[in-house]
Image (cartoon, rainbow, N blue to C red):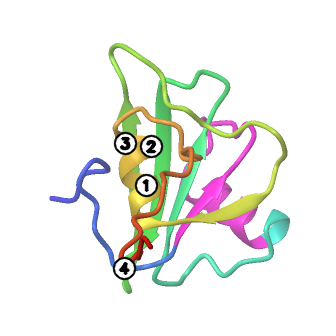
Amino acid sequence: MKMLNDFNCNCPIYLASGYTDLRRGIDGLATIIEKQFKLESCTNALFLFCGRRTDRIKGLYWEGDGFLLLYKRLEKGKFQWPRKSEECVTITPQQYRWLMEGLNIIQPKSTQKISGIKFS
């Protein structure tokens, strides 16, 4: 059984920023993917959507012979969902893990390790 927390499709992950009406089902979400974002819904990719209440998200994934609709509702806490515009952005597997852990997908940059410094 596939779950959103440990979903690993080794595929592109698209996040629909802004608000999505989560009353929509498979057909409604696939229509958003194709009409609004101009992407192919029947492809090996995970599409993520969040409503006004940021305690629940839906995922849509094409399995080759049909869609898998994933739904997650947090009992406590909220997802850190980008709200700026209604566009579809690609996120990395690391950003996906952060999202599932309740963290912001835009993390501050860490300092880079430096090696081979010579002091005179």
**Could you tell me how far apart the alpha carbons at marks 2 and 4 are, in whole angstroms?**
36 Å
Q: Which residue is mark 4?
A: 116
Mark 3 neighbour density, 10 Å: few (under 14) some (14–19) many (20 or more)? some
Q: Which residue is mark 2?
A: 99
- Helix, strand or loop status at disc 3: helix
Q: Is residue 40 left or right of residue 61?
A: right
Whether tag 4 and tag 3 are in contact, CB under 8 A, the answer is: no
Q: Which one is in front in this view, the residue at disc 4 or the one at disc 1?
A: 4
Asked if residue 11 is among those painted magenta in the image, a careful observer would answer no
Q: Which one is in front in this view, the residue at disc 2 or the one at disc 4?
A: 4
Per the rendered image, the range of residues in magenta is 13-34
The answer to whether 58 is drawn above or below residue 53 in the figure is below
Q: Quadrant of residue 72?
A: top left
Q: Which one is in front in this view, the residue at disc 4 or the one at disc 3?
A: 4
- Mark closest to the chain's N terminus, 4 or 3: 3
| Rendered location of residue 85, percent (x, y) | 84, 45
Whether tag 2 and tag 1 are in contact, CB under 8 A, the answer is: yes
Mark 4 neighbour density, 10 Å: few (under 14) some (14–19) many (20 or more)? few
Mark 1 neighbour density, 10 Å: few (under 14) some (14–19) many (20 or more)? many
Q: Which residue is mark 3?
A: 100
Q: Residue at x 41, y 32 (%)?
A: 102
Dot 2 amino acid type: Leu
Dot 3 amino acid type: Met
| Rendered location of residue 81, percent (x, y) | 60, 37
Whether tag 1 and tag 3 are in contact, CB under 8 A, the answer is: yes
- Mark closest to the chain's N terminus, 4 or 1: 1
- Helix, strand or loop status at disc 4: loop
| Rendered location of residue 78, percent (x, y) | 48, 22
**Could you tell me how far apart the alpha carbons at marks 4 and 3 are, in whole angstroms?**
37 Å
